[in-house]
Amino acid sequence: MFRYVHTNIIAQNVDKLIDFYKTVLHCKSIGETRDLKGEWLDRLTGLNGAHIIGEHLLLPGYGDDHPTLEIFSYDMLKETVPAEINRPGIAHLSFEVDDVEKTLKEIICAGGKSVGELVTAPYPDGLEAVFVYAQDPEGNIIELQSWRKINL
């Protein structure tokens, strides 16, 4: 078997960030909470005394099996580095939504913020996309997108 399983976010406030993704971006609890520690976790992470808490959330639009967004926190966190859209590494999570502008407002009301401007862009085959980048309350970048057929 070979399949994509999850993406992990390390949170400063795990409960608040889990609630944000469930409330604003329609992720769903599936009963996969974690409270992990032990010698095996220290070996896996390379950290002494590692302790992880958090939850796997089912991403919207998928069945109850996977993929998930894994939101965890460690007892000891490193200093944060601000997320930037052009920094090497994983840049953002993307969600297709019915109304980009409405969802952006919900993100902002829930403690997030806008990164750039909302734009509409033409695509081949008579498609048009609406895009915007935003940040969750902890600064992780989220792309919102909506697609529609245009009359030519």
Image (spheres, grey):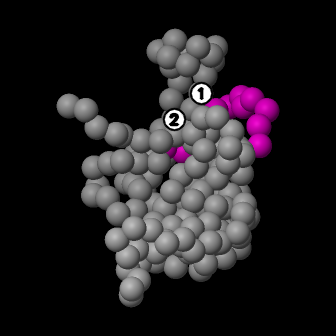
Q: For the point 53% across and 24% down, which residue is it?
A: 37
The answer to if 75 sits in the magenta stretch is yes
In the picture of the structure, the residue carrying the numbered disc 2 is: 35
Main secondary structure type of the part rendered in magenta: loop
Which residues are drawn in magenta?
70-82
Position of 116 relative to 119 (above/below): above
Magenta-colored stretch includes residue 132: no
Q: Position of residue 43 (x, y in %)?
A: 52, 12
Q: Nearer the viewer, residue 30 or 150?
A: 150
Categorize mark 2 by other alpha carbons within 10 Å: few (<14), some (14-19), many (20+).
few
Residue 21 is situated, as x and y percent measured from the top left of the image, at 55, 60
Give the labeled residue for mark 1.
51
Q: Secondary structure at mark 2?
A: strand
Q: Of all residues shown, which one is farthest toward the bottom?
A: 151
Judged from the image, the secondary structure of the residue bearing numbered disc 1 is: strand
Placement of the N terminus among the 4 image quadrants? top left
Q: Are marks 2 and 1 in contact (CB under 8 Å)?
A: yes
**Looking at the image, is mark 2 or mark 1 earlier in the sequence?**
2
